[in-house]
């Protein structure tokens, strides 16, 4: 189908990027389980290698099944192009790679997925990059952290481990004024709840492992480009604005215009970093995306009910869910996240660390796993697992203190989930 702007989200999540297979008429997108593609002739091969013609060469760079997923996610996010890769963490490196260089930094929110805190505070140093962490509610601190070597601002929309939503418009205004891109990790919100590009984001990254796939089967990532950033406006982004030796001096921005970042991601990023998504993973994720809106609606409805029930329970100290009127971010949700605050939140129980451990051990429907965005409900004690690499200060800043558990509410019957929490809370706080 031609995906004009007239189609609604529910239609696009099923059709965008796909059409019946030209070879067989297969209605569902086939899994193109192939490494290489036969060139028509030597001239065709040369044109492909020179980036003069778009086509398939080798599946480290492009694959037809993965291409459908890329176009589908780009369409749902309102971007001009997307590059899929092997995981959400790969997507973050792939997003930063064309922007950064030794000595460069990214100004990043403190409210992040635990693995991202580790990636940004430790691992990227090996590339000579660094991150400056700031509280994104303190706009002056965000502005103050930007220096001449800053190449991007990074934040999550609905932030992990839950209870916080970012004012993306405010972040975008600061990035615009500084002439740098805003990167938003939209994993927990998905484009159904939040479309960061409409609020001024330059790039959107995803762990497709989570809600987009929706059933805990495969890892994957995606970078979506808004196509709106002028990479040649200053000399900060030479990978995109200056001649690329590996392609005979081609300048990506001059040659590909709004698609410069996407082409660079494939022609340099995937070619040389090799963090490729495989076609099987793309297939599972395409299956998931077809029902994204239906699932997200139920995820949010269940989360809302369960958060309210927990908040009213005496065994619970507090609940941080931005969809509750008690949350300081409730008005922000009403203004910018009209379809809800996601299905991820934390709550603290009386009895601290030990009671949390007893709680996760006593639940029957909830699974104790290091994942989120699954159809089934999940729980984790962040301080002893995903966030244990962090210092106590970093744990508190990330909303993952010792007495707190994080839940990812699934799409089961809300009453069954409440009953499960009820019996486990009794055991934990006995
Ligand atoms: C899971 C997750 C990641 C990392 O994604 P992987 O697919 O596990 O590499 C990044 N950001 C957020 C918000 C996540 O939930």
Image (spheres, rainbow, N blue to C red):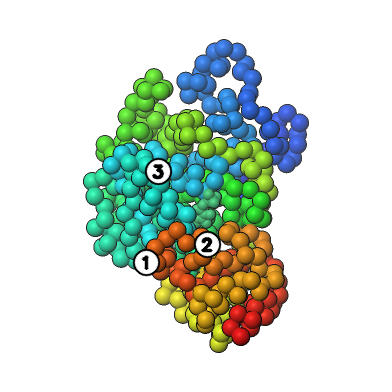
Give x and y (percent) for residue 303. Answer: 59, 71
Marker count (numbered): 3
N-terminal label among 1 and 3: 3
Q: Is residue 276 above or below residue 340?
A: above
Residue 409 placement, left or right of 185: right
Residue 32 placement, left or right of 206: right
Image point (58%, 83%), residue name: 429
Look at the image and tell me in which quarter the N terminus lies: top right
**Under 8 Å from ligand 1: the CB of mark 3?**
no
Give x and y (percent) for residue 243. Answer: 34, 26
Image point (34%, 63%), residue name: 135
- Label 3 and label 2: CA atoms lie apart by 27 Å
Q: Which residue is mark 1?
A: 393
Identify the mark at residue 96; answer none if there is no mark.
3
N-terminal label among 1 and 2: 2
The local secondary structure at tag 1 comes to helix
Residue 204 in sight in this render: yes
Q: Nearer the viewer, mark 1 or mark 3?
A: 1
The local secondary structure at tag 2 comes to loop
| Residue situated furthest bottom in the rendering | 314
Give x and y (percent) for residue 44. Answer: 56, 16
Q: Nearer the viewer, mark 3 or mark 2?
A: 2
Q: Which residue is mark 2?
A: 385
């Amino acid at each position: 189908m031609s995906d004009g702007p007239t189609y609604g989200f529910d239609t696009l999540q099923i059709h965008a990027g796909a059409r019946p297979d030209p070879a067989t008429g297969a209605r569902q997108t086939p899994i193109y389980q192939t490494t290489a593609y036969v060139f028509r002739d030597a001239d065709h091969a040369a044109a492909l290698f020179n980036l003069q013609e778009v086509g398939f060469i080798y599946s480290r760079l492009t694959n037809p099944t993965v291409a459908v997923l890329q176009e589908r996610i780009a369409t749902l996010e309102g971007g001009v192009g997307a590059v899929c890769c092997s995981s959400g963490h790969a997507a973050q490196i792939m997003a930063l790679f064309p922007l950064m260089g030794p000595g460069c930094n990214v100004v990043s929110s403190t409210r992040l997925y635990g693995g991202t805190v580790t990636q940004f505070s430790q691992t990227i140093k090996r590339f000579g990059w660094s991150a400056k962490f700031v509280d994104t509610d303190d706009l002056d601190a965000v502005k103050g952290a930007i220096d001449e070597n800053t190449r991007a601002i990074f934040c999550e929309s609905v932030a992990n481990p839950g209870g916080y939503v970012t004012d993306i418009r405010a972040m975008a205004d600061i990035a615009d004024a500084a002439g740098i891109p805003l990167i938003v990790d939209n994993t927990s919100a998905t484009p159904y709840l939040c479309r960061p590009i409409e609020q001024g984001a330059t790039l959107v990254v995803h762990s497709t492992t989570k809600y987009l796939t929706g059933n805990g089967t495969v890892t994957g990532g995606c970078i979506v480009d808004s196509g709106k950033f002028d990479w040649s406006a200053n000399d900060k982004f030479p990978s995109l604005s200056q001649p690329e030796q590996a392609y005979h001096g081609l300048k990506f921005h001059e040659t590909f215009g709004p698609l410069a970042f996407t082409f660079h991601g494939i022609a340099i990023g995937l070619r040389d970093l090799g963090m490729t998504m495989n076609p099987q993973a793309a297939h599972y994720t395409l299956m998931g995306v077809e029902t994204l809106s239906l699932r997200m609606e139920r995820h949010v409805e269940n989360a809302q009910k369960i958060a309210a029930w927990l908040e009213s329970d005496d065994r619970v100290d507090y609940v941080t869910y931005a969809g509750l009127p008690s949350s300081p971010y409730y008005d922000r949700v009403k203004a910018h996240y009209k379809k809800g605050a996601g299905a991820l939140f934390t709550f603290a129980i009386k009895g601290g660390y030990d009671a949390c451990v007893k709680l996760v051990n006593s639940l029957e429907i909830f699974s104790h796993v290091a994942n989120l965005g699954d159809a089934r409900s999940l729980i984790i004690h962040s301080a002893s697992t995903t966030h244990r690499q962090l210092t106590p200060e970093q744990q508190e800043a990330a909303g993952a203190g010792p007495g707190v558990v994080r839940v990812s509410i699934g799409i089961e019957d809300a009453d069954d989930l409440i009953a499960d929490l009820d019996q486990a809370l009794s055991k934990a706080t006995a």
